[in-house]
């Protein structure tokens, strides 16, 4: 049984304890993360880029995520696992339920969907069927071609107001966790205060209820471009277990992310 749950994460938000999360794709890293203080992992469709070498996440299939979720579960019975629903696998409530079932059977504790109010019927259907849902707002990578690139979202007032109302609507429909990606820190703070569910930030400043990084960025092994919001913890720590512990300590103490990792 996973040590973390939707209830423990909610209590962490309420008590002000930061939630530490990383992406994970296999058994060895799942065990490393479970043994060194990570509260939850995401089997992210970022695997399309960091494992498969794609330019974006769109080629990832539900079978890919199910396979890696099974690998991660094989490494740890204790980890809380969030599994990403890939591009075009949750276009309708029926499709969402069928595909989420595959991920839950593979070992996930929760599924993550990218998007705003158009998802409400799917979120209601999933939660009614017993599938916990994590929302994802801001720079939602599956919409990269609509955005015209991997660009910071929510900088103008209209977009920011829309994101706050999307966050409230996702919570009202049943979402129990919310990822905020690459948005101005003030907006992430406003969303975190506007909802009762925990928020997990990546490139969203220090005021979200928790943080997530792609594990390859934390270990400094991402090929090519290193995003401004990420940090190579291995370079300072010297070993992988110490890098993960340092990340956890820095997130819990509020030392990471600092101003240099934020967007305005
Ligand atoms: O796919 C992924 O790894 C993600 C995180 C970057 C939040 O969605």
Image (cartoon, rainbow, N blue to C red):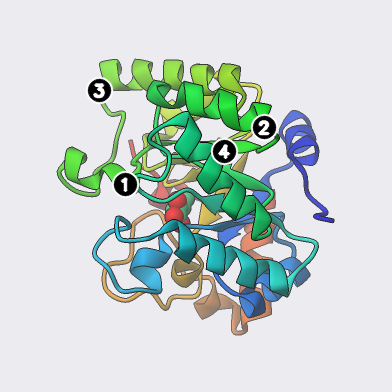
The residue sitting at 31% across, 29% down in the picture is 154
Image check: 5 left or right of 201?
A: right
Residue 132 in view (yes/no): yes
Residue 244 in view (yes/no): no
- Residue that numbered label 2 is attached to: 129
Mark 1 or 3: in front is 1
Image coords of residue 30 (percent x, y)? 66, 70
The reply to whether callout 1 and callout 4 are in contact (CB within 8 Å) is no
Circle count: 4
Mark 4 or 3: in front is 4
Q: Is residue 193 above or below residue 126?
A: above
Cα gap from disc 2 to disc 3, whole angstroms: 37 Å
- Of 193 and 3, the residue lying toward us: 3
- Residue that numbered label 3 is attached to: 156
Image coords of residue 12 (percent x, y)? 76, 38
Cα gap from disc 2 to disc 1, whole angstroms: 25 Å
Mark 2 or 3: in front is 2
Q: Earlier in the sequence, mark 1 or mark 4?
A: 4
SS state under label 1: helix
Quadrant in which the C terminus appears: top left
The reply to whether callout 2 and callout 3 are in contact (CB within 8 Å) is no
Q: Earlier in the sequence, mark 2 or mark 3?
A: 2
Cα gap from disc 4 to disc 3, whole angstroms: 25 Å
Cα gap from disc 1 to disc 3, whole angstroms: 21 Å
- Residue that numbered label 1 is attached to: 142
Image coords of residue 5 (percent x, y)? 77, 44
């Amino acid at each position: 049984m996973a040590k973390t749950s939707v209830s423990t994460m909610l209590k962490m938000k309420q008590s002000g304890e930061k939630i530490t999360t990383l992406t994970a794709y296999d058994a060895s890293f799942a065990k490393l993360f479970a043994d060194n203080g990570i509260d939850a992992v995401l089997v992210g469709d970022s695997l399309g880029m960091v494992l498969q070498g794609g330019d974006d996440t769109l080629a990832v299939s539900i079978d890919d995520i199910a396979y890696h979720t099974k690998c991660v579960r094989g490494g740890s019975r204790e980890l809380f696992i969030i599994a990403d629903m890939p591009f075009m696998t949750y276009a309708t409530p029926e499709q969402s339920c069928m595909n989420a079932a595959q991920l839950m059977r593979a070992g996930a504790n929760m599924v993550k969907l990218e998007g705003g109010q158009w998802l409400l019927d799917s979120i209601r259907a999933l939660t009614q069927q017993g599938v916990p849902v994590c929302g994802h707002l801001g720079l939602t990578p599956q919409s990269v071609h609509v955005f015209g690139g991997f660009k910071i979202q929510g900088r103008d007032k209209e977009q920011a107001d829309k994101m706050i109302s999307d966050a409230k609507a996702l919570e009202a429909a049943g979402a129990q966790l919310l990822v905020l990606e690459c948005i101005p820190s003030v907006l992430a703070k406003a969303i975190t205060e506007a909802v009762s569910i925990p928020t997990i930030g990546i490139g969203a400043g220090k005021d979200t209820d928790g943080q997530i990084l792609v594990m390859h960025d934390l270990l400094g092994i991402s090929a090519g471009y290193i995003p401004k919001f990420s940090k190579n913890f291995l370079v300072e720590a010297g070993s992988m277990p110490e890098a993960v512990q340092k990340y956890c300590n820095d997130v819990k103490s509020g030392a990471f992310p600092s101003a240099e990792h934020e967007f305005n």
